[in-house]
């Protein structure tokens, strides 16, 4: 039997992290710009030759701004983020951006930013490449986990907090990727085609707030094109909007290798070509300057920006490395834990199956691929190597201690085991799979070699210089049912898997990839052909595939331990290879591919099998956003969205599972039932198809992204934006809104929130505005203010919001300005975009 929680849980030990505070002595906020700084920056510019100035416009050694000893500028070290300091060895890993947004707490974002700023100082990092603020447009985008969700206001508030935190420690934050980088496939080619109103209302506000409110020191131009033009080369985005209208006075840098034409980039306002001045260099710029197509004044402005920012942040006056800050910093751990605690979202809790009662749950089954090892982060440049990330298995087991039992299984075979154990019908002399190699990329003509293999499980297919390889096998299903086909290649390889002549998986060419699977219904005893047409890419020569019966994929012992336990915890979802990262062969460094809406291989079947064996099944999903739960959600009583919670995440989850704390995260995204419900579904991919040479992605949904679409169309989401359950209950009352107002003065709104349940908890009061009399179509509701309130049982709090002009305005694309149409506005207050029990109206005269 498990002892009572308070015996197991020693606040003085590992979990006591929350009581520690950040020392303020470490703060080193940047100086505001001043005439003195401008004078000094100008004097520095004046001391350099044109060549020396041009050299400064390209980075060096992959992660540095060049030094200029003649003016005392040291080499400035950069690091990836945003969920920790990535580039320079292990570091504290915090909850991912999407999780930080799920906390709905800009002050937490600031504490997190400050802790990351300290980690940066410990590693001599002057410029942190975060935060990422691209809007969650579709659940498929492979880098959603880095960003702050689907709503521009929530993203802006979270970004401002994060940036102010980082910069308060004397480190430049870099807001990225500017702009409309909302998918990963074809990220370096695709054009996001968006009208100005949609850009202004949805995709730009978080960048605008980062510049205008948080005074971010750097902005990174994105890989994708916007309306046909690369942002690094866009006069409108760089020179006119960012630097002109918003008054950005810091450093505008390119994403890595994303500046395309040096002269164009120089004139468009790009200051720093990363990582090494491939486009802006002496070769391209000196002749242009001589010819007068690039002005010396433009070069001076760029160099001045680098100097000004370096002066403001104090880089000329101190060593950026602060050796007194411990690299494994106990000051950070409470912040990382707090971030995880605040962001876990409880989505379903039928019959109050959670929290688990240690008096009743003596044996707990912990099952699933995400239970161990720890899945603290997703992949790619956002992946931080944490010193000591705790897995869910370890955190739960340590909590339970010797007072109870935790039974464990990964639940599913590793893909390598599926390839190895796949049994195809006997065929050629030495094996079941015929492997034909071709000297061309389209499998035409006779093969240059034919051989037979027993399995397609090799890390190398050894087909020499073949330009395409066809694998053909035959499979006779022992009985009627669903069969899971799994296939995997590497990098830019492409392939198509056919079962019985039908295409079931199509891997298009992209920069990198993850394993793919398809479930196919087959007749018993009827042999089908399984064919993989494989075209090696740059990495080449690695393809694997296999098949397993859906009802055999979960080992019998898994169902047994689930049945033996008083409750089962199924830990599924993605990981650093499957989301944001690289492929399994390289260990996750690739970026540039999207993830699937369906959960990875076999996980639906696993959840169903465990739920059938144990009625108290709790599912936790690790993901950067929505996923398909239709196959099993009705069968499981509890579901938790776990995001990527960083190194302390599993401890936070354990606290919530066992009721030491109430969950308080709220979705920063809408979770739809099916991907087809999403307003972006029909135009997520380019108009000319995935192989288009000039891909254009039409943002045809306009401003109706996420809940803006769902609340307006009446299509019901599975879990709405803003939604998240607690172990206690809250009520809203006494909404007070003036009957009339004036948008220039703004409108002040008050509302009371009460904890009506049995225990302490936190609620997010969400205020949405609707403009039914607008001259343009507007969403029924748009989030315009929010506040997170912690309350003891029985307590109430009055929240006051002030709505400024922007809260009522839309962007008028004809007049190119924000506009308020006088008339009736509806204010909605509630705890999600769908549940807004209080409404009131205000009439604005102007
Ligand atoms: C990513 C950026 C990152 C940069 C440097 C790029 O591939 O898109 O987010 O900061 O690499 O690692």
Image: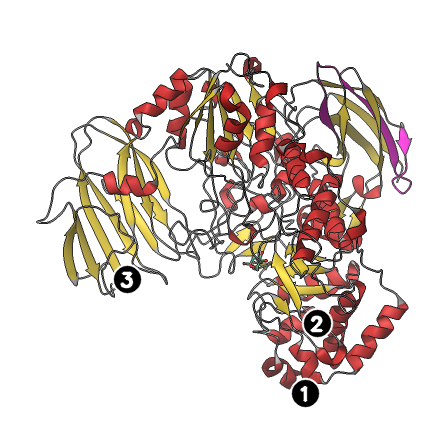
Quadrant including the C terminus: top right
Q: Which residue is mark 2?
A: 74
In percent of width and height, residue 240 lies at 74, 64
Instruction: Tell whether 654 sits left or right of 511.
Output: right
Q: Residue furthest bottom?
A: 290
Give me the C-alpha separation between circle 3 and circle 2: 50 Å
* Residue sitting nearer the eye, 593 or 137: 593
Task: Identify the mark nearer the N-term, 1 or 2.
Answer: 2
Give me the C-alpha separation between circle 1 and circle 2: 29 Å
Q: Is residue 213 visible?
A: no
* Residue sitting nearer the eye, 795 or 338: 338
Q: Quarter-wise, where is residue 641 in the image?
A: top right
Numbered range of the magenta stretch? 739-765
Coloring basis for residues = secondary structure
Give me the C-alpha separation between circle 1 and circle 3: 47 Å
Category of crowding for the residue at label 2, using alpha-carbon neighbours closer than 10 angstroms: few (below 14), some (14–19), many (at least 20): some
Q: Is residue 792 above or below residue 505?
A: above
Disc number at residue 290?
A: 1
Report if residue 746 lies within the magenta region.
yes
In percent of width and height, residue 192 lies at 57, 54
Q: Is residue 79 visible?
A: yes
In percent of width and height, residue 476 lies at 17, 34
Instruction: Tell whether 350 sits left or right of 462.
Output: right
Q: For ligand 1, which image quadrant applies?
A: bottom right
């Amino acid at each position: 039997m498990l002892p009572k929680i308070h015996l197991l849980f020693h606040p003085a030990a590992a979990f006591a992290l929350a009581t520690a505070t950040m020392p303020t002595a470490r703060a080193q906020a940047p100086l505001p710009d001043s005439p003195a700084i401008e004078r000094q920056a100008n004097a520095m510019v004046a001391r350099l030759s044109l060549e020396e100035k041009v050299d400064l416009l390209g980075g060096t050694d992959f992660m540095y701004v060049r030094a200029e000893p003649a003016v005392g500028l040291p080499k400035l070290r950069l690091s990836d983020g945003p969920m920790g300091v990535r580039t320079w060895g292990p570091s504290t890993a915090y909850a991912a951006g999407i999780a930080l947004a799920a906390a709905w707490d800009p002050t937490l974002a600031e504490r997190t930013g400050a802790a990351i700023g300290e980690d940066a100082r410990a590693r001599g990092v002057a410029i942190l490449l975060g935060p990422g603020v691209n809007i969650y447009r579709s659940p498929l985008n492979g880098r959603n986990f880095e960003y702050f969700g689907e709503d521009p206001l929530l993203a802006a508030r979270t970004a401002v907090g994060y940036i102010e935190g980082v910069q308060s420690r004397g480190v430049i934050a870099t807001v990225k990727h500017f702009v409309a980088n909302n998918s990963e496939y074809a990220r370096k080619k695709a054009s996001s085609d968006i009208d100005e109103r949609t850009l202004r209302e949805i995709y730009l506000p978080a960048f605008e707030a980062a510049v205008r409110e948080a005074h971010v020191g750097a902005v990174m131009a994105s890989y994708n094109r916007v309306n046909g033009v690369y942002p690094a080369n866009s006069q409108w985005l760089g020179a006119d909007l960012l630097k002109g209208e918003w008054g950005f006075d810091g450093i505008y840098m390119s994403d890595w290798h994303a500046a395309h034409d040096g002269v164009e980039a120089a004139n468009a306002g790009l200051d720093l070509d990363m990582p090494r001045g491939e486009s802006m260099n002496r070769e391209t710029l000196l002749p242009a300057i001589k010819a007068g197509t690039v002005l010396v004044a433009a070069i001076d402005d760029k160099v001045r920006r680098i100097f000004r920012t370096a002066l403001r942040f104090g880089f000329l006056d101190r060593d950026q490395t602060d050796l007194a800050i411990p690299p494994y910093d106990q000051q950070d751990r409470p912040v990382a834990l707090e971030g995880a605690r605040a962001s876990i979202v409880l989505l379903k809790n039928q019959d109050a199956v959670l929290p688990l009662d240690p008096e009743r749950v003596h044996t707990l089954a912990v099952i699933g691929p995400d239970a161990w090892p720890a899945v603290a982060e997703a992949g790619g440049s956002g992946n931080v190597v944490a010193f000591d990330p705790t897995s869910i298995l370890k955190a739960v087991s340590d909590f339970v201690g010797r007072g109870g039992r935790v039974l464990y299984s990964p639940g599913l075979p590793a893909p390598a085991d599926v390839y190895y154990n796949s049994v195809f019908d006997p065929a050629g002399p030495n094996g079941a799979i015929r492997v034909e190699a071709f000297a061309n990329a389209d499998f035409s003509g006779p093969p240059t070699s034919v051989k037979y293999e027993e399995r397609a499980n090799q890390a190398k297919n050894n087909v020499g210089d073949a330009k395409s390889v066809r694998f053909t096998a035959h499979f006779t299903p022992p009985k009627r049912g669903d069969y899971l086909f799994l296939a995997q290649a590497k990098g830019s390889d492409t392939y198509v898997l056919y079962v019985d002549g039908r295409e079931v998986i199509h891997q298009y060419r992209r920069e990198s990839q993850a394993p793919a699977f398809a479930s196919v219904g087959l007749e018993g005893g009827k042999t089908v052909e399984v064919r993989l047409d494989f075209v090696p890419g740059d990495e080449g020569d690695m393809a694997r595939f296999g098949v397993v019966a859906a009802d055999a994929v979960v080992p019998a012992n898994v169902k047994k331990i689930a049945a033996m336990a008083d409750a089962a915890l199924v830990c599924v979802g993605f990981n650093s290879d499957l989301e944001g990262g690289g492929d399994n062969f390289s260990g996750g460094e690739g970026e540039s591919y999207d993830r699937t809406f369906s959960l990875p291989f076999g996980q639906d079947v696993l959840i169903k099998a465990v739920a059938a064996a144990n009625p108290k099944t709790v599912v936790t999903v690790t993901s950067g956003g929505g996923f398909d739960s239709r196959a099993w959600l009705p069968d499981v009583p509890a579901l938790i969205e776990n995001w990527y919670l960083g190194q302390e995440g599993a401890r936070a989850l354990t606290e919530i599972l066992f009721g030491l704390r109430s969950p308080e995260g709220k979705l920063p995204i809408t979770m739809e039932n099916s991907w087809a419900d999403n307003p972006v579904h029909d135009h997520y991919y380019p108009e000319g198809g995935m192989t288009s040479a000039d891909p254009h992605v039409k943002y045809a949904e306009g401003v109706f992204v996420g809940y803006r679409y769902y609340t307006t169309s009446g299509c019901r989401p599975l879990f709405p934006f803003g939604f998240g359950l607690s172990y206690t209950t809250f009520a809203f009352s006494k909404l007070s809104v003036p009957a009339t107002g004036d948008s220039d003065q703004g409108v002040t709104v008050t509302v009371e929130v009460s904890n009506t349940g049995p225990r302490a908890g936190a609620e997010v009061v969400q205020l949405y505005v609707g403009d039914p009399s607008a001259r343009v179509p507007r969403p029924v509701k748009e989030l315009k203010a929010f506040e997170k309130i912690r309350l003891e049982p029985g307590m109430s709090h009055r929240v006051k919001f002030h709505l400024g002009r922007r809260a009522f305005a839309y962007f008028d694309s004809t007049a190119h300005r924000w506009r308020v149409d006088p008339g009736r506005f509806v204010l909605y207050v509630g705890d999600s975009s769908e549940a807004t029990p209080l409404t009131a109206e205000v009439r604005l005269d102007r």
